[in-house]
Image (spheres, rainbow, N blue to C red):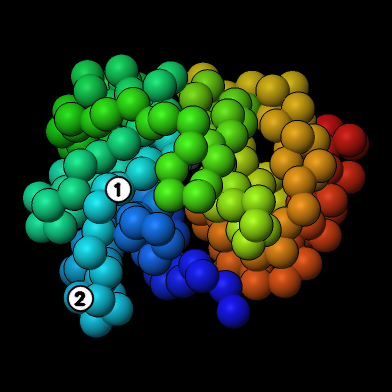
Amino acid sequence: MSKIEVHSLVGRGYSSNVFLVKAEDDFLIDAGLDISNEVIDTAEKSGLDVDRIILTHRHADHVGDAEVLSEELEAPLFAPEKEADALRGGDDRTIMGSNFGKKIPPLEVEDLEKNYSGFRIINTPGHTAGSICLYHPDEKILFSGDTVFSQGSVGRTDLPTGDREELKKSVKRLSELDVRSLYPGHMSPVENDGDHHIERALKHLRFL
Ligand SMILES: [Zn+2]
């Protein structure tokens, strides 16, 4: 039995997926957009005592509900170092709230450390300059943000701070991990064969 419990809220509308994780500490991966009621509801029903909210990258569909969730759940926000300044400054050009018809306020975010609650933070630039993934080596769980999705899909690299060559390197790095469960920022999570999905993504990228 896995010691880790993951409650997946698959994003509808423009929202990213949001994951509620019960590990050594309880925490959220990404905040989503217009999905906060569901997140709070799920946190209450599952008896989660959310310690923090971790943002995988700066995009509005992942951080839109960050402020309200941080307040409601009394949990501080954490973001990768290279994403944090944009979030603190409410940089609409790269956060792209306007593209979703939203004004994302400047967010008070703290810098992520290298390890948290049994997870390793892996820097995976490409979709944005500071995108990260979280990997649990014992449970073989990967939260992949918008770097790689299920079914061999990968994140866009044509948005501000995106870089296709960096994304290729990042997916290659992820393909070297032993991944059972893959929890991506969009599309369906997969509970088994995660590395098979990443391998497919890597093959696609070779032709780009
Ligand atoms: Zn994104």
Could you tell me which secondary element the residue under label 2 belongs to?
Answer: helix
- Image vertical order of residue 199 relative to residue 109, above or below: below
Viewer-side residue, 171 vs 128: 171
Disc ID at residue 154:
none
Q: Position of residue 147 (x, y in %)?
A: 61, 41
Point 31% across, 36% down: residue: 78
Judge whether residue 18 can be spotted in this image: no
* Amino acid tagged 2: Glu
- Image vertical order of residue 177 relative to residue 50, above or below: above
* Amino acid tagged 1: Ile
Q: Position of residue 155 (x, y in %)?
A: 62, 42
Could you tell me which secondary element the residue under label 1 belongs to?
Answer: strand
Cα–Cα span, label 1 and label 2: 15 Å
Viewer-side residue, 47 vs 93: 47
Identify the image quadrant of the N terminus: bottom right
Judge whether residue 153 can be spotted in this image: yes
Q: Position of residue 141 (x, y in %)?
A: 61, 58
Disc ID at residue 44:
2
The residue where tag 1 is placed is 53
Viewer-side residue, 98 vs 200: 200
Please count the marks in the image.
Answer: 2
Assess mark 1: CB under 8 A from ligand 1?
no
Identify the image quadrant of the C terminus: top right
Point 42% across, 30% down: residue: 113
Q: Where, by quadrant of the figure, is residue 8 drawn?
A: bottom left
Crowdedness near tag 1: few (<14), some (14–19) or many (≥20) residues, C-alpha within 10 Å? many
Crowdedness near tag 2: few (<14), some (14–19) or many (≥20) residues, C-alpha within 10 Å? few
**Do tag 1 and tag 2 residues touch (Cβ < 8 Å)?**
no
Q: Earlier in the sequence, mark 1 or mark 2?
A: 2
Q: Is residue 119 left or right of residue 157?
A: left
Point 43% across, 19% down: residue: 82
Q: Is residue 67 left or right of residue 168?
A: left
